[in-house]
């Protein structure tokens, strides 16, 4: 139990805590000394992916025959997200690789595709991304304009995608494209585009206000010949597959949110004990104590919510609506909490050298990607029948 969250967690078993200690060791040795430079470079060194693969932190759910961990317990994924977020190592795109992309590669691939892609997915030799968002289409996935036309034994893919995490490093990109515009939601398919395919270009390395080390890019596809063998699942089922996999992405984002809340609140409590004003610690003032009491309560409420929904996800019972609840509520709470923690730091909170300032910048996108807060509320409103 952390200082910030007055709640004894029951989610994990001893084996998960051993995994946590192992991952912390990896972060201390292979990430901590380099992350500041990666933030300046706006991208991580690919070697960190190879090291993560070597130590078993990529593809935990992949069967052992394809080089993975052979364990689909999402609690291992959760440990990675919690520790990466708490340490603010935002450059590591492992959660997108493990939590978002992998389900498509496990559930939709045939045997030939599994053998072709999964071993290198697990070793870190093959970095993945998924390309949904377009310059003119964000949360409204049915507005996707990228087009793939079947031509014999391949598709001709044209279009542009933006805000793609792992976009620069990616060797395998799952691209959502129209294959039959006349069929509406049943006119989308998922195509796997691989590094080196003619016409596949990476555009600007996007200049964000936060998540400095995270590799985010524009991608363009100009008459890219994508072999039919790179179709994921069935043609026309792409939108269905997205709806099936988005809940896990959203609960993963909620895990990031609560992990960041706890880390920032703990650091802020410590700061208020050390920082003095008028001759005594600022934490001794009633206003500070009341603000911290409110934030601790809100953080605990979010932690209980996220852990309960995680338990449902582990049982295969998490609904799209519950994932939407967890996603919008936790991320909005994250943004609000970090803003108030920054206020308690005073002028120092506005300095990039202080972790709370960087956490503030990193947090803002959480209510946007994975489906905006407004879209999450729309999902819930429809379920309520209004």
Image (spheres, rainbow, N blue to C red):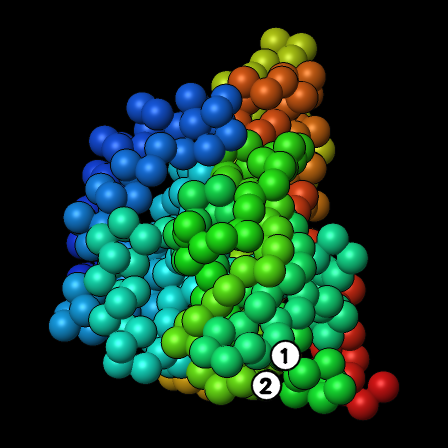
Identify the mark nearer the N-term, 1 or 2.
Answer: 1
Q: Indicate whether 206 appears above or below 113.
A: above
Contact between marks 1 and 2 (CB within 8 A): the answer is: yes
Query: At x 75% / y 86%, what residue is drawn?
Result: 182
Q: Quadrant of residue 362?
A: top right
303 relative to 338 in the view: left or right: left
Which residue in the protein does label 2 denote? Answer: 236
Q: Position of residue 224 (x, y in %)?
A: 54, 60
Q: Indicate whether 238 appears above or below 253.
A: below
Query: At x 71% / y 33%, what residue is drawn?
Result: 287
Q: Position of residue 228 (x, y in %)?
A: 45, 77
Task: Answer few, some or many: residues within 10 Å of disc 1's Cα (few below 14, many 20 plus, some between 14 and 19).
Answer: many
Q: Quadrant of residue 120?
A: bottom left
| Residue 179 badge | 1
Q: Secondary structure at mark 2?
A: loop
Does residue 183 appear in the picture of this structure?
Answer: yes
Q: Indicate whether 298 appears above or below 75.
A: above
Q: Secondary structure at mark 1?
A: loop
Q: Position of residue 359 (x, y in %)?
A: 57, 35
């Amino acid at each position: 139990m952390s200082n910030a969250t007055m709640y004894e967690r029951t989610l994990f078993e001893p084996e998960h805590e051993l995994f946590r200690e192992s991952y912390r060791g990896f972060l201390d040795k292979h990430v901590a000394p380099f992350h500041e430079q990666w933030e300046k470079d706006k991208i991580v060194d690919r070697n960190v992916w190879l090291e993560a693969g070597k130590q078993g932190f990529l593809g935990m759910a992949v069967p052992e025959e394809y080089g993975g961990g052979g364990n689909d317990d999402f609690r291992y994924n959760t440990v990675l997200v919690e520790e990466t977020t708490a340490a603010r190592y935002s450059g590591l795109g492992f959660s997108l690789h493990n939590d978002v992309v992998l389900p498509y590669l496990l559930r939709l691939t045939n045997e030939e595709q599994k053998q072709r892609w999964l071993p290198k997915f697990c070793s870190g030799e093959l970095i993945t991304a998924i390309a949904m968002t377009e310059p003119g289409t964000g949360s409204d996935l049915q507005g996707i304009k990228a087009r793939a036309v079947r031509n014999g034994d391949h598709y001709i893919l044209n279009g542009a995608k933006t805000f793609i995490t792992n976009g620069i490093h990616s060797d395998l990109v799952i691209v959502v494209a129209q294959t039959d515009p006349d069929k509406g939601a049943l006119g989308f398919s998922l195509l796997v585009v691989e590094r080196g395919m003619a016409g596949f270009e990476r555009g600007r390395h996007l200049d964000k206000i936060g998540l400095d080390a995270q590799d985010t890019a524009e991608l363009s596809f100009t008459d890219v010949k994508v072999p039919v063998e790179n179709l994921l699942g069935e043609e026309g089922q792409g939108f269905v597959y997205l709806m099936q996999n988005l809940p896990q992405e959203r609960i993963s984002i909620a895990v990031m949110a609560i992990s960041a809340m706890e880390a920032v609140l703990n650091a802020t409590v410590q700061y208020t004990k050390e920082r003095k004003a008028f001759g005594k610690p600022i934490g001794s003032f009633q206003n500070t104590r009341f603000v911290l009491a409110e934030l601790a309560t809100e953080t605990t409420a979010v932690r209980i919510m996220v852990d309960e929904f995680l338990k449902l996800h582990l049982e295969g019972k998490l609904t799209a609506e519950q994932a939407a609840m967890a996603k919008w509520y936790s991320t909005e709470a994250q943004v609000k909490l970090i803003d108030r923690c920054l206020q308690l730091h005073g002028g120092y909170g506005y300095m990039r050298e202080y972790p709370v300032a960087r956490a503030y910048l990193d947090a803002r996108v959480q209510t946007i990607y994975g489906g905006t807060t407004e879209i999450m509320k729309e999902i819930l409103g429809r379920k309520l029948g209004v």
